[in-house]
Image (cartoon, coloured by chain):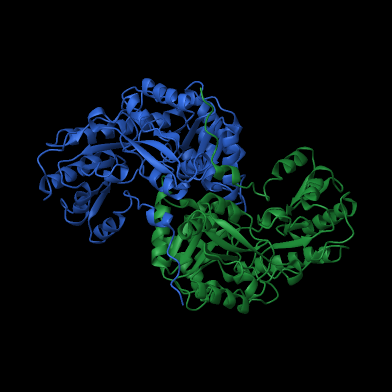
Chain colours: A green, B blue
């Protein structure tokens, strides 16, 4: 008998999630009785609006049927009203409901790119883009942003230099995961100008839309002029309403051919989850004060984490402008080794911290080796303690160096 | 300004669902006041076990968090016990929870095949396999089964003749969607023998496992000997518990490298839907009598539909052995035109029927043009009436021919 065929190249290049690959170590640590402050995953702890959970708990149908491939009409209408409240006037047919933001990005890459096509991304970037790209055979071409610049965009020439014959799109995330950076008007206009001039699509992951601090506003890619056919918005209810597990997101586009392709992708998987959509029809009943309170809470948390890190010797960090992440360059030899050290070798009074090593957020080999992403998704007292534990570990970590490297 | 780049080739070849593409016509018909018996989609009307919906309605957490990428441990344990009850002894780590059967097939194709690789399928086959294959750049190579043979497998030589250098797997569905055929022991052993000899993977979609009639039993691919590394089971709670909308399914495999690849695919999309998994932890409390009652109900419905079609002049049909579909070859010029006629031009007392034209279930051009798939997913009185309406339409359809063609 012959050996079975090997798995696909696709399976072999598919990356493990750097966010989730430490999960087994965390499990062992928990089993050993350690308390772990989980700052490695963007898993909000904030309560979901009660209107949404109440809608779920009063689910009255006798079974759970398929919905339309493009989403339940009642939920699409709720989203349309949500966007109108965010200053984005949309028609229902411009909204396509997906199985979370993940599927929104996957379908978008699939509809825009064939295997071997390229998409520009600004590194560090949300690491799961790597996974979607690998599934679709798409090459992500990194344009590096630097901690020293607050991870804002480089000059136009540095971006244009990365555009090649196979480039099809620019993929951005603002407010940014993992950096917390919010692109300003000038940056958004520059990206719009590049995409207009080159015929590129601008794919904008705006799942953290409301999470902007210090009085900032987020500039949506949908407001860029002359780009109606080229802007694709990827969105999700996951972070906004602490509903990561419902797996409900959406695409927004004004490009009918693109939407038609996405519909055909969507028909193959039949429909996005019905229960999450039903629950989220209640989002029209969620008062504006809910999200205002959430954002104020995250701003306070950001300050806790930033102030702790900024006061620590040798750490290079900028105050994040949005989202609920902070990237910090640490005085360590290897952030992966440090993250493992935290889980395996360290505790302070039985407590330790899980963080995400940042090298998985870079596509350029070697970058991010001394950087971690911290998600400030715990309430303030826990977060204060978590930072104490984190900095105590940093002080005694055997691979510590004097100062984070400046580049 | 240049034109935006065209969409990908992938987007252009991605097929529209033949099951769902008549949805706009159905919407128009409903708006015009017609009652439509929807026999085009495998959307069960049977109530979900109350234990499952009760678990959902008592959801007590304050938000809806991500779960593990491979699924919630409590749900995996419930599945393990379910499989044990079905005579399949599994370990928890052999079960990977997916976003419905759709994602199970998508991930499996992705892990086994690179673009250009081939998978053998027996046509007519579940049309959405086409969509997953298009997304992954995989070529489905059809082996034709015939209504005259009850859609059972052809001789071994006819199957082996389709295996080429790029063939990586054989994809089956038993009980079958769309034909209702249940492969017997000899057929399953033959497939196992072919896959063993050629090193091919055997991907078995067994979402209709329990839906077998007239005292038959289903033979799971997992019971084939010497194929532990090559059998991949794709499964789902959708049909079994009338939970199509929860989007919860799973893969079963004993191949660790394959499971590791699937885990990396799964990490990219973070996790399958939490709510559906939480609800389905209750499936251990569902008594065996539930599924027995469901199967008895579907067997009665099958007889209603089969008897009606078999008694109609010119229709070629075999009594289905399982699932809840029947394929019928009709005395019509074009089953698509007939399906459109039903929705657009016909009614009997204000009522009409939606069916799925079967050409989309074939990969060989020209096949299935006079065939429809009917899902018997309504209760008996409605189903009787639906068949009356259907046959009345067939009698007056302008494109009617004398008899269904025999091949």
Rendered location of residue A249, percent (x, y): 52, 58
Q: Nearer the viewer, residue B219 or B349?
A: B219
Can residue B94 be seen?
yes
Quadrant hosting residue A208: bottom right
Q: Position of residue B101 (x, y in %)?
A: 46, 41
Side of B394 relative to A76 (left or right): left
Q: Is residue A295 left or right of residue B293?
A: right
Quadrant for the C terminus of chain B, please: top left
> Which residue is found at the position 60% from the left and 35% from the top?
B257
Residue B63 appears in the picture as rendered: no
Q: How many marks?
A: 0
Q: Is residue B252 left or right of residue B355?
A: right
Image coordinates for residue A148, horizontal then vertical, percent: 76, 70
Q: Nearer the viewer, residue B325 or A202?
A: A202
Residue B295 in the image: above or below residue A366: above
Residue at x-position 57% and y-position 59%: A50
The picture places residue B138, in percent across and down from the top left corner, at: 44, 44
- A291 and A209: which is toward the camera: A209
């Amino acid at each position: 008998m012959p050996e079975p065929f090997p798995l696909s190249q696709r399976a072999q290049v598919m990356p493990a999630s750097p966010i989730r690959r430490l999960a087994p170590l965390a499990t062992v640590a928990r089993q050993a009785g350690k308390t772990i402050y989980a700052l490695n995953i963007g898993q909000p702890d904030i309560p979901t609006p009660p209107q949404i959970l109440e809608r779920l708990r009063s689910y009255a149908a006798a079974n759970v049927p398929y919905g339309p491939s493009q989403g339940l009409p009642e939920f699409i209408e709720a989203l349309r009203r949500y966007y109108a409240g965010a200053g984005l006037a949309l028609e229902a047919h411009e909204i396509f409901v997906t199985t979370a933001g993940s599927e929104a990005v996957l379908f978008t890459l699939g509809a825009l790119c064939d295997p071997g096509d390229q998409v520009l991304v600004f590194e560090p970037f949300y690491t799961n883009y790597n996974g979607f790209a690998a599934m679709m055979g798409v090459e992500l071409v990194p344009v590096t942003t630097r901690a020293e610049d607050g991870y804002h965009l480089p000059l136009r020439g540095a971006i244009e230099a990365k555009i090649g014959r196979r480039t099809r799109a620019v993929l951005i995330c603002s407010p940014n995961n993992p950096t917390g950076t919010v692109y300003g008007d000038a940056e958004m206009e520059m990206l719009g100008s590049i995409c207009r001039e080159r015929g590129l699509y601008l794919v904008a992951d705006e799942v953290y839309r409301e999470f902007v601090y210090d009085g900032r506003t987020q500039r949506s890619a949908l407001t860029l002029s002359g780009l109606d056919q080229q802007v694709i918005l990827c969105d999700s209810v996951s972070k906004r309403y602490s509903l990561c597990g419902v797996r409900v997101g959406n695409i927004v586009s004004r490009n009918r051919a693109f939407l038609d392709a996405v519909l055909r992708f969507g028909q193959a998987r039949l429909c996005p989850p019905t229960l999450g959509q039903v629950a989220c029809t209640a989002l029209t009943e969620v008062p504006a004060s809910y999200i205002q309170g959430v954002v104020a809470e995250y701003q306070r948390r950001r300050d806790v984490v930033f102030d702790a890190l900024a006061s620590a010797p040798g750490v290079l960090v900028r105050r994040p402008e949005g989202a609920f992440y902070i990237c910090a360059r640490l005085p360590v030899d290897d952030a992966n080794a440090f993250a493992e050290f935290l889980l395996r070798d360290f505790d302070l009074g039985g407590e330790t911290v899980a963080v995400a090593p940042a090298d998985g957020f870079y596509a350029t080999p070697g970058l991010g080796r001394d950087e971690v992403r911290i998600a400030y998704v715990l309430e303030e007292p826990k977060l204060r303690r978590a930072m104490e534990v984190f900095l105590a570990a940093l002080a005694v970590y055997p691979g510590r160096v004097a100062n984070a490297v400046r580049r």
